[in-house]
Amino acid sequence: MKFKNSTKNKIGRYFPNYIDAEGLDAGILETENAFSALSYKRQINRVKTYKWHTTGKLDNTFMRPALIKKRPLLEVDWQPLLFAELGRLRSEALQVSVMDFGAVADGKTDSTKAFLRAMGQGGRSVSIPEGEFIISGLKIPSNTELIGAGTTKTFLRMHDFAPKSRQGIRNRNRYLGNRSIRLEGFTLDWRAERFPEKEKSSVRGIRSSGITLCNVKFGLVRNICVRNAGLHGVDVTSAYYSYAGDGTTSRFRSRYVWIDDVEAYGFGDDGITTHHSDYVYITHSFLHDPSGRAHQTGFSNSNGIEVDDGSRHVVLHNNYTENCFGGVEIKAHETSSAAYDTQIIGHYSKRDNRAYNFRHIGHHKENDTNTLTAIGIRATFLVAEEPQNTPLYEESVPRALVVSAYQKVAIHHFCTVSQSETPVIAIQYRARYVDLAHICYRGIAPEIKTGQGVHLEHVSPVNEWSL
């Protein structure tokens, strides 16, 4: 894994216990105990279904904390289900090479039809050798693997004339859904530079991304690099983005998806994002240097990792973001339900404008309606290094941490690193039942700001970092 150890060592410089399995588990369990003790108020008491949306009592459960328990891998509850499914796929799939179906690795010939022939109706493991393959967008059937020779050897590049609306790779059936898809070992270059620089790089909806999994059950995206996507590098989503109001969610959701060892840069919006999906695990990934071209110049909310509208039970572990608007953003738009029950275990944010940004837009200011769904964040071992101004969002003031509207939030072992200006930790705009503990700094001490209407359970003293 390219980024696993480097990110682990970056975080471990400030939290030595993070390196050790027992120390990691102890930190996670400490946060979990604080989280379990926090109150929260959920205001949805009815259940109703209409069209493609569900409204009412969505989910009142929280996942158990992800733990190592002396294994080499941090494991979430549902991961054995994914391993069993992918093991079945590997044992049953027919092994084929895309070259046997007419693909040409010359960087000139459109090999899209060769890939489609190789995948057939599914049930195949398609190997992709070294070389550069031109594609116009691939739609992956169920029970299919695409396995390259590595991110520095196998390249899939979007055709000059592929439409802006086209994803680089997407599962085949949006509304019927697909299952058991594995993508591994290649670089996907969406090539947003194909379009004039003054144009936005994406169109509306779930289109224009590098890799989109929509309504997928059991998916693995591993050892992948996504360059210059028009919208998102990797998007785990439902069949469409639902904006039917807070308290509603979308059908046709993805679930049981693992994103591992992914690098994305040059993306128009977010590096890795989730929408209206359940049980997503994002690990050992590096998201950096977005273009922001999916937005108006100077107003680009381009995040490294975004856990967005209607997502539930998402775990982030050992990821690294750099030069983004937000390093990790957990949020929702005003007309959608907020992300619910998110765990962050180890994250390094470097020069992101807002290292950690947790909010429900349109539901946190004095005259807004109360959020119904912004509940449940557990975070342990976070580093915010040099939050800074960014041309992505010119009017945004740098922050090490922002919590707005969310309730039941436990953040333990948080370190700010700055030699240039005072980092700010802002707990504001109706944030409730928030616990901050073991806050340290290197360089300039952070300032903790709290707004009116905020309910803080506990804030520990801020101490200077030392080994």
Image (cartoon, rainbow, N blue to C red):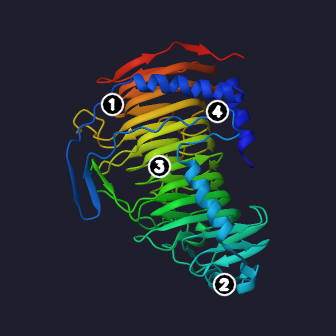
Q: Which residue is identified by label 4?
A: 69
Q: Nearer the viewer, mark 1 or mark 2?
A: 2
* Residue 378 spot, x, y in % from top left: 48, 32
The label on residue 429 is 1
Total labels: the figure holds 4
Q: Secondary structure at mark 2?
A: helix
Looking at the image, tell me whether mark 1 or mark 2 is earlier in sequence order.
Answer: 2
Q: How far is disc 4 from disc 2 in space, using C-alphas?
A: 45 Å
Q: Nearer the viewer, mark 4 or mark 1?
A: 4
Q: How far is disc 3 from disc 4 in space, using C-alphas?
A: 37 Å
* Residue 175 spot, x, y in % from top left: 40, 70
Looking at the image, tell me whether mark 3 or mark 1 is earlier in sequence order.
Answer: 3
Looking at the image, tell me whether mark 3 or mark 4 is earlier in sequence order.
Answer: 4
The kind of residue on which mark 3 rests is Asn
Q: How far is disc 4 from disc 1 in space, using C-alphas?
A: 38 Å
The kind of residue on which mark 1 rests is Tyr
Q: Are marks 3 and 1 in contact (CB under 8 Å)?
A: no
Left or right position of 363 against 134: left
Q: Which residue is identified by label 2?
A: 114
The kind of residue on which mark 2 rests is Ala
The kind of residue on which mark 4 rests is Lys
* Residue 228 spot, x, y in % from top left: 61, 62
- Residue 317 found in image quarter: top right
The label on residue 4 is none
Q: Which residue is identified by label 3?
A: 301
Q: Secondary structure at mark 3?
A: loop
Q: Secondary structure at mark 4?
A: loop
- Residue 88 found in image quarter: bottom right
Image position of 371 with respect to 221: above or below: above
Q: Are marks 1 and 2 in contact (CB under 8 Å)?
A: no
